[in-house]
Each structure stands twice: as C-alpha cells, then as structure tokens.
Amino acid sequence: MSLPRAFRILWTANASSNLADGLAFVSMPLLAASLTEDPRLVAGLATVYGLVRLLVTAPVGVWVDRTDRRTLLALANILRGTGVLALALCIHLGVGGLLLLYAVFALVGTLESVADNAGVSLVPDFVRASELDRANGRISATQLVADEFLGPPLGGLLFAFAASAPIFAMGGLWAAAGAIALALPVRRRRADLASGPRQASVWHEVVTGSRWLLQNRTVRGLALIGGLASVGYMLPFSILVLFVQRQLNLGDVGYGAILAVSALGGLVGSGLTARIRGHIGYRWTIVASLATGAASLLALALTTNPILAAVLLAVYICHAVVWGICATSLRQRLVPDELRGRVNASSRIIGLIGLTLSSAIGGGLALIHIALPVAAGGVVFALCSVIAMRLIRADSAA
C-alpha cells in the first residue's frame, strides 16, 4: 500500500533539500578555499555551522511546538534559498568575501535546524503509526542518495564550471523545497496553541520538554543511546581518512571508493528496517543493530584488507541507518504532538555534544595507534547495545 499523498509531498520537499545539502557539502568548503589559503579559516566554516546549530536547537524546538510546522518548514527552506541565492549573486558579481560566506553559513545552519525539526515532527501527522518505519526508511534512503551519491560529485562538477554555479543550484533547490512544502495540507491548530500558556518563556518551555524526556524511560533511553552513538560514530570517522591511508594503504581514490561502498549499506538498511522491526519489534531491532555496529568497528580495527574494510564499513552504515530509523519512529510514536519539537531538540543537543567532544578524543587516541579510535567506537556501541536492552521495553510502542 502506498504512503499518503501528504507524506509524498513532504518526502519530495525533503528530497530537494537533501540534494542541496549534498551540493553544500562539497561546494561550500571549495568556495572557502578559493577565498583564503588559511586552513583554519576553511575549517572554521564547519565550526561555525556546528556552534550555531548547538546554540539554536533548544529555542527552535519551542518554536516548532508553538507555530504551524508546515509554515515553518516552508519558510525555513525559502529563506535558506533566498540567502544562498544572494550569496551566489554576490560571488558572480565579484563582491563580498569570506565574512559574507561565514554569515550565510550561520544563517543556513540556523534555518536547517528549523527545517529538520519541523520536518521530523510533521511525519506522524501524515503517516499512521504502523507505517512510520517505512516512511522514515524512504526519507533516509533519499537522503543517502542525495547526500552521498548525487550531491557531492554534482557540486564538484558545477564548481569546476563556475564558483557560483553550485551556489545558485543550492539556492534554487532549497527555495523549491519551501514551495513544495506549501502544498502540504493545513492542519487544525493543536490544542496547546489554542489554549496553552502562550506567556511562558522560551526557557520554561525548553525545561518542560526536557523534563518530559527525562521522565519517560524509553525516550530517555533513546536520547542517552543517541548521545553515546554520536561518540561512537565520530571517534572513528574523525580520523577515517588517516586510517584508510595508514592502515589500508589507500590514496584519495581508494578513500572515496570505500565511502561509496559504505553508503550502499545504508540503502540496504533503509529498505530492511520496517521488515525486521515487524518481526522482532523495536527493542530487539535496536539492540541487534547496535551490537552489529560494535562488531563491525571492532573487526575494522583489526583488518588491513581494503575490500574487507569496505564491507565492514557498509555493515556499519547499515546498522546506523536501522538504528536511526527505529529511534526516530519510536520517538514519533511515544512523544505527544505538542511536545515533539522540544523533545526532538533535547535529543539533538545530546547528540551534538557527543559529536563535538568525541572528534577531539578521536584525534588524541589516533596519536597512540591509528586503529584505536575505531576500536573505541566499537566499545561504545557495545555499551549502547547493553543500555538499549535495559532501557527499551519490548512493549515500548504498544
């Protein structure tokens, strides 16, 4: 049975936005490198982006719960598109510079936080609970194709043609995503918008969402596992290029090939999640996927064979997608509509903190041995599997 028309509209808007994200992944650093030779300033783009997202995530969650999510999703994408199109025009005319690029990147980071939270919070409005795994799997598969297979090579090709070309394309795709989102059906105002205490401060509402998360055993467990999984992910991936060079003895082409193969594992995971969960439930699907992630990283730390390493990374990405879909769907089932934005934000903040801390730790461990961050990531995922077994009940989504 096909998914509802409203979801297909949301999925199409997400697909357009995902392709723009894939273009940005390559073209923004290339643009920064064309404006300065200082590696600190080029790397600073990612720092600004991460810092902005960390700072705005909590208030964005409140905004998503206070405001019509359809309108938020549309406006966030249209404003992203408008800002990036203005940047592209400045580049084409030869005006502006690195400071303008930083400002636009900060704007994009802020609006991406809005669009991501609103989009995830909208899915349960259009899809029955029994179909959430399939819907989230389709979104995940599309994101992988756009971010990993289409966006980066297209961004590089367009940049080779003209520095402003991928920026114009990004702006157009984000603006299109916003326009498509306007076709979503308008829902009746939620009860909290109509009768809730609108005078409450933003931080009071942030605390309300965080308190609900802490009081719900399963959602609290998902947030804790998500934070630890972010650590487990970033430990090996912060130094993966060095691991590939030193332990697998591959160059840039080999590194790209391994990443491409690993992304295929994600496509497999996005297609299998709903079936696996239907047979063994959320609890054991999550436990098994996290244990698989642990085993794949521990084995990767020991191998020097590039082909085996590519297969193990594909297994790892498959686990990451299965875990991500299950966590998202389970949270969508359990969190009340009026709290969805704030609980999503609280969970996201925990994950962002994990990503930030573990990248530095991964670099330090690599000084001891290049495979140590990979093995440490495996240990973290093994711990996540144990936590999932204890905190996620078999009847969590009943």
Image: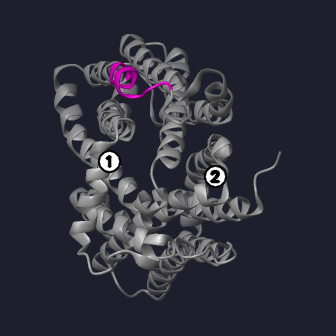
Residue type at numbered disc 2: Leu
Q: Position of residue 71 (x, y in %)?
A: 54, 78
Q: Position of residue 355 (x, y in %)?
A: 29, 43
Q: Which residues lie in the magenta part? A: 385-394
Whether residue 195 is situated above or below residue 57 in the rendered picture: below
Q: Residues within 10 Å of mark 2 (few under 14, many from 20)?
A: some
Q: From the viewer's side, name the closer residue of 145 and 113.
A: 113
Does residue 128 appear left or right of residue 322 in this picture?
A: right
Q: Earlier in the sequence, mark 2 or mark 1?
A: 2
Q: Residue at label 1?
A: 213
Q: For the point 83% across and 45% down, which residue is it?
A: 1
Q: Is residue 388 magenta?
A: yes
Q: Residue at label 2?
A: 150
Can residue 54 be seen here? no
Q: For the point 20% across and 42% down, which residue is it?
A: 357
Label 1 residue SS:
helix
From the viewer's perspective, is the residue at label 2 or at label 1 nearer? 1
Q: Is residue 37 magenta?
A: no
Main SS class of the magenta portion in the image: helix
Residue type at numbered disc 1: Leu
Whether residue 310 is situated above or below residue 360 in the rendered picture: above
Which corner quadrant holds the C terminus?
top right
Residue 50 appears in which quarter of the rendering?
Answer: bottom left
Does residue 311 appear left or right of residue 104 in this picture?
A: right
The disc label shown at residue 184, or none = none
Q: Position of residue 7 (x, y in %)?
A: 69, 59
